[in-house]
Each structure stands twice: as C-alpha cells, then as structure tokens.
Amino acid sequence: MAYVLFTLSVLLVMGFVGFSSKPSPIYGGLALIVSGVVGCVIVLNCGGVYMGLVMFLVYLGGMMVVFGYTTAMAIEEYPETWGSGLEVLGGLLVGLMMEVVLVLWVLSLDETVVVSFSDTGDWVIFEGEGSGLIRGDSIGAGALYDYGRWLVVVAGWTLFVGVYIVIEIVRGN
Amino acid sequence: MNPLAQPIIYTTMITGTLITTLSSHWFLAWVGLEMNMLAFIPILMKKTNPRSTEAAIKYFLMQSTASMVLMMAIISNNLLSGCWTTTSYINQPPSLMMMTALAMKLGMAPFHFWVPEVTQGTPLTSGLLLLTWQKLAPISIMYQIHPSINIHILLTLSTLSTAMGSWGGLNQTQLRKILGYSSITHMGWMMMTLVYNPMTTIFYLTIYIILTTTMFLTLNLSSSTTTLMLSRTWNKSTHLAPLMAPILMSLGGLPPLTGFLPKWIIIQELTMNNSFLIPSIMTIMTLLNLYFYMRLIYTTSLTLFPTSNNTKMTWQLENTKPMPLIPPLIITSTLLLPISPLLLTFH
C-alpha cells in the first residue's frame, strides 16, 4: 500500500503517453479522462480530499465534457486511433517501453530520484484552539479569495482575454 | 484586428510584462510571461495568411516550451530551497533550467531558429513588438537571477548567439529576417556582462530598443520588406535615404554613433574582469553584422538600381503617411555618444 502513489504516478504517465502519441482528439480526450481520474486519485491519496473532489467536478465534469462536445462537433469521418496507423502505434509503444524502463531503473535504485514516494507529506492539518480541525486544502481554497485576491483577478482576466484571443485567431478575417 | 478586441489584447500584453517585472513571487512572474505570450499571438496574426499563422504557431510552441521549462525550474527550486521569491539565490540545477528557458524566450543560440522565421511571417509593426517589447519580461527575470547564473554556460550562449546571428544574416535579402538575425546578435552581446555588471545589460537593452524601433518605423514608412524595395527609398521618401546610413551604422556598432556606446561599455566590463579573448571574438563576429548593414546602405543611398521611368515620379507626389516619432528616434539613435557620462551613471 506504500507503493500506491508510485503505481498511480506510473498509470498517470501511461495515460499521458496515450494522448501524446497523437491520435485523433476524440481518443486523446479519452486518454485525458483516464489521466484526469488517476490524477484526482493521486491528489486524494495525498490527503487533499477537497481538492480532489473539486477537480473531479470542475475538470472532468465541466471542462472535459465541454471538450468532448466540441471535438464531437469537429470530428472527421475516420478518426485516427491508436491501432490505425504505424505512427501512432509506434509512438504509443515507444512511450510505454520508455516508461517501463524508467520504472525498473527507479525501482532498482536505493535513493530517491526526484520525489520520495515513501514519505510524501499530507495536506497540512491545523489544530485550532476551540475551533476543531482545519484542513489545509479547503482553507487554501478560501484563502485564495482572501490573501490571493490579486491572483484570482489575474487568472480571471487571463481566462476572459483567452476567449477574445481564440476568437481573434479563429475568425480574424 | 477587431477594434473591440484590440485594446483588450494590447492591454493584456502590456499587463503581462508589467506583472512579470513587478512581481517578487516566482508564480506570478510565470503568469505574467504566459499572459504576455497568449496576448501576443493574435498580434502576430494581424494579417491572416498561412505564413503568419505558421509564424504564430512557431512562436507559441517555442514560448510555451520555454514556459514549461521555467515552471519546472521554479518548482525544483522550491523543492530544494523552499523559496518562492525571485530575489533570493537559486540552486544550480534549477538556475541552469531557468537560463535555458529564458534563452529560449529571448531567441539566443542554440534556440535562435524561430526568430528570423517568426519575424518574417508577421507585419512590420508586429515584428517591432516581437523584437523590442517581448524582450523586456525575460530580461527582467534574468536580471533578478543574475547572482545564481553559471558564468561559463552564459558566456557560451552569448558567444554562440553573436556567431549565429552574424553568420545567419549574411545571405538574407528579406529585411525582417535581417533584423531578426541582428536581434540574435544583440541578445548575445547583452548577456555577456549579466554576471559582471547587470546594469550594462539593461543599458544595452535600452539602446537596442531605441535602435530597433527606429529601424522598424523607418522601414514601415516605405513599407519595404526586401532589399529591392528598400532600394526605392530615394524615390518614395527622399529625406530618409541618406538617413538610413547612420541608423544602420549605429546598429552595427560604429563609433562615433550611439550604437557603439553599449558595446564599448560591455568590452570595458569584460576586460576589467581579465577576459580578453571573448570580447575580441565577439567584436570580430559583429563585423559580419556590420557588413550586411553596409549592404543595405549601399542599396539605399549609394547606388540607384535601374528602374522603369514611371516609378521615378513617386517623390513628386505628397506623402500622406504619418511619421510616428521618427525624427527624435533618429537623433537618439545616432547622436547620444557625446552625453555618455550622463547616461553611464551606473559606473
């Protein structure tokens, strides 16, 4: 059970290989859903219950659904899937093979490579006086609108301008 | 561009650079760079043709790769030191990644291949913004991390940039590509003294922005994008034909013009640090830059190419195109050397 984080990370990278071998976007969206689910479970395993559930709702349930609908509108007659041509299949197999080699190499080492999986910290838990338990992730989301107000403003403005930019690029005339 | 979207996009581009230069948290510095890049893409595609689309895609791919590497460096630095401030010392491996990412953003060799092609695929005013405004944010970050930068790799990148920029521009007739290669060369010069005296980098950047702006606006007056079109400047705007000569010579770094001053300061800084071979190599490489500027001067004002008779009448018609800021820019880009003690207050 101590290796569950490691296994989930390996599954995440394999999901990424699935869409970075460049099939048609509809299949890429499928691989993104798999990677997204695994990523959420990683966040849940690190103790970020609120963050993981918010990611499920907003990312997978909101953004991915919209992405799926838009790609379904722009789909071609015979979309390219993982087994439909040598390029995509070759990319997928090379990516998976490199991931297996990396996993075997990391497992054979004794020291930590980038992040140690055995003692990753948990989301910080505070004991307030008389107020009970305060979890780091949900308090962090609240602090985003308090201490991080400027960041929310900048992020919101960037998303707003992103729509203008995409419309300009696509329908610039 | 849609006149409703234009102020929003230009405001976002300026705000992105401002956020990067004014932030002390690494995350916001990265956010500013991303805002800047995103808002610059439709500016690159002002005229929608496949060439500008390709230029915008190339720009987007290069800059987003660089942003990814920068984010990796920021997070690695936080893992190693727990620090989010831009003014504190950066550990060596993340500092190397940051330098690579910022070199990719600035168009320094060996990541310089996108600069001439993106400058070529866009209109002249977009190219102006690409080579002047887009350099401000990455250089501000490099200024802030200058104590942690590995000297040897930075000097290698600078020397390579000067060499690649000079050699690459030799066989060009397209003016935007020439200015792109000139930008690569100047980036190489700028980063030479970043570790020794970072104020010289900012000084070189200021003079370079003035020179490049003058060049682009002068070219924009006659809308000339090739050497052949530049050879008709004597006919279109007669007063500008002999004025291109000092501007280009200043860009190439000839004394007693302004462009010589930053190069002089950089050579002085390097020799004060007992480095003689590198400034000699850089100066000799930049002579190639001066050679292809001289070729432009030759076609502009020193010869008259054979043209048909009815194209020789353009100067008799009144020129209605406004000249934005060109006279003060020409004066600034050629005559600043006598007041150099006033400019060199950081010495």
Image (tube, helix red, strand yellow):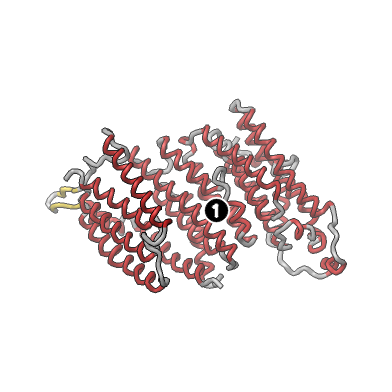
Q: Is residue B144 above or below residue A70?
A: above
List x then y, in percent, for residue B157: 56, 38
List x then y, in percent, for residue B171: 70, 48
Residue at 52% x, 61% y: name it.
Answer: B41
Residue A162 lies in what quarter of the image?
Answer: bottom left
Residue at the extreme top of the image, as rendered: B274
- At label 1, counting other C-alpha atoms closer than 10 Å, the crowd grade (few under 14, some 14-19, many 20 or more) is many
Q: Secondary structure at mark 1?
A: helix
Residue B220 lies in what quarter of the image?
Answer: bottom right
Q: Which residue is mark 1?
A: B134
Examine the rendering and report whether any part of residue B283 can be seen. yes
Residue A85 lies in what quarter of the image?
Answer: bottom left
List x then y, in percent, for residue A95: 37, 49
Question: What amino acid type is highlighted by mark number 1?
Answer: Gln
List x then y, in percent, for residue B59: 53, 56
Quarter of the rendering occupied by the C terminus of chain B: top right
